[in-house]
Image: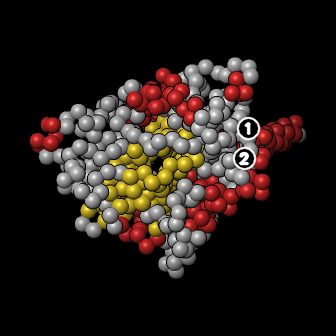
């Protein structure tokens, strides 16, 4: 194996459960033909479920995550009956990440680490990032691979807040080892002894890391890790809301790049490209050329058509029906950190760089106003070495050796405090905003009133 095929998908779910068969139909649309099964699939999910369920976590998220697992199973069947194991799933509030590996290669995964940081108000997880770092062995080498799912601040005028969110992610995204017990539990759920699929009702969230016995922690940037950063990063194409009738000039389907309605004329206004090139965000990360229309924000009318036979015949549609109160933007992105300079072409002539085979937007889903985005990356099947002393001095300004921000020394306390707040907010939302919660409240009130009436009658008697 000269390269490890890694397929990354980012999707803002719109707080709704997906239609698994429909999602499966389009999941591998970005794979070049003839389609072959990638070794690794990573799903980066934002707004996975309603706030109450997301903040409470655990079993409340199982129905939402199970649908994605089911979609991967369906989508993999045409790829020479490929079968995947969901080796680990993590969420931080409303943001989640799921990592799948081919069933016959699960033994290649040697170790796992996880991380999460909230960047919402009071560090809550309505916005934030969750990451997985794993060791994947190929021959004598073990590749260190880091995957991050992120969701930054919304709105056209919140550019500085998005940059600040990125900085706080770098400061607070601290990876800690997943306990051996948790790894075994996760694998056992995905890989039954009889080789059949795990029961859909099995928990998808493994036990948390045993942090009290953690020997070390590490941040996002390390000298030897590949980094893949994906999510609803929310960078827009304008710093102000649209004026009246602005939508008349917005992109529409056309194959002629010279046509005024072609999306390429809007791309130069993309905030993320500008801020990244200016060194104000996503330091060191690169992105394949964007050759797809804006992924946000589609109207309710467009979503109503998504998933119908009409949409299946023409996924791009005859028109793009944009929401008129938001500028069409490339909110959903997948970036990566290129190989370090000390991994020279001379010593790695066969695979000296990451190669992006495909970077595309998938068709619109009826459950979200975002289009999913997928990227197939060939990762060199060689571990990134530690730089020697001479190389370290020569490349001391490289972002792997000199991260843009130091780790927050109080990251653990801040996450624990935020988690208590998340549970409190989640419980309040559950009781006030869900039918199940309202039913509990009504039952409690009725019980209390009944008890009070009984006590009163006894006292009067």
Q: Nearer the viewer, mark 1 or mark 2?
A: 2
Q: Is residue 62 above or below residue 338?
A: below
Q: Residue at x 15, y 37 (%)?
A: 394
Q: Position of residue 406 (x, y in %)?
A: 30, 31
Q: Is residue 69 left or right of residue 90?
A: right
Q: Give the camera-side residue of 71 and 451.
A: 71
Residue at 24% from the left image edge and 57% from the top image edge: 349
Q: Which mark is residue 317?
A: 2
Question: Which residue has dot 1 on it?
Answer: 321
Residue lying at 49% horizontally and 52% vertically, measured from the top left: 358
Q: Is residue 206 left or right of residue 314?
A: left
* Disc number for residue 375: none
**Image position, residue 160 (x, y; %):** 48, 22
Q: How is the image coloured?
A: secondary structure
In percent of width and height, residue 268 lies at 52, 29
Instruction: Give me the residue at 56% from left, 59% from top.
Output: 28
| Quadrant containing the N terminus in the rendered view | bottom left
- Measured as percent of width and height from the top left, residue 175 is found at 36, 46
Q: Are marks 1 and 2 in contact (CB under 8 Å)?
A: yes
Q: Residues within 10 Å of mark 1 (few under 14, many from 20)?
A: some
């Amino acid at each position: 194996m000269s390269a490890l095929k890694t397929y990354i998908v980012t999707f803002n779910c719109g707080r709704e459960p997906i239609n698994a068969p429909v999602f499966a139909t389009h999941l591998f649309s970005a794979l070049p033909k003839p389609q072959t099964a990638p070794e690794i699939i990573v799903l980066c999910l934002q707004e996975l479920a309603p706030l109450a369920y997301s903040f409470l976590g655990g079993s409340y998220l199982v129905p939402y995550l199970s649908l994605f697992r089911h979609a991967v199973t369906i989508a993999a069947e045409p790829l020479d009956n490929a079968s995947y194991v969901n080796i680990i799933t993590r969420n931080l509030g409303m943001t989640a990440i799921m990592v799948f590996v081919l069933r016959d290669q699960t033994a290649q995964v040697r170790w796992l680490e996880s991380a999460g940081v909230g960047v919402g108000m009071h560090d809550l997880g309505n916005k934030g990032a969750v990451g997985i770092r794993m060791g994947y062995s190929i021959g004598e080498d073990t590749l260190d691979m880091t995957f991050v799912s992120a969701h930054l601040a919304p709105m056209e005028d919140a550019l500085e807040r998005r940059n600040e969110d990125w900085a706080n992610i770098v400061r607070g995204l601290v990876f800690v080892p997943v306990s051996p017990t948790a790894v075994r539990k996760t694998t056992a759920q995905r890989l039954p002894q009889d080789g059949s699929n795990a029961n859909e009702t099995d928990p998808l969230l493994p036990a948390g890391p045993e942090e009290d016995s953690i020997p070390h922690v590490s941040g996002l940037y390390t000298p030897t890790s590949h980094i893949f950063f994906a999510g609803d990063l929310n960078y827009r194409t304008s710093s102000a809301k649209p004026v009246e009738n602005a939508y008349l000039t917005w992109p529409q389907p056309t194959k002629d790049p010279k046509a005024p309605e072609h999306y390429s004329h809007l791309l130069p206004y993309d905030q993320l490209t500008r801020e990244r090139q200016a060194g104000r965000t996503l330091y060191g990360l690169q992105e394949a050329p964007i050759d797809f229309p804006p992924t946000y924000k589609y109207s309710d009318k467009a979503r109503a058509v998504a998933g119908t036979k009409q949409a299946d015949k023409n996924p791009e549609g005859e028109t793009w029906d944009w929401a008129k109160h938001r500028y069409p933007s490339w909110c959903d992105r997948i970036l990566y950190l290129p190989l370090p300079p000390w991994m020279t072409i001379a010593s790695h002539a066969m695979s000296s760089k990451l190669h992006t085979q495909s970077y595309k937007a998938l068709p619109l889903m009826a459950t979200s106003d975002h289009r999913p985005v997928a990227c197939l990356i060939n990762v060199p099947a060689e571990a990134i070495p530690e730089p020697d002393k001479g190389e370290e001095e020569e490349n001391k300004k490289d972002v792997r050796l000199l991260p843009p921000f130091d780790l927050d020394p109080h990251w653990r306390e801040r996450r624990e405090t935020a988690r208590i707040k998340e549970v409190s907010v989640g419980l309040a939302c559950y009781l006030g905003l869900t039918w199940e919660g309202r039913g509990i409240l009504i039952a409690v009130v009725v019980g209390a009133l009944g008890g009070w009436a009984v006590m009163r009658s006894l006292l009067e008697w």
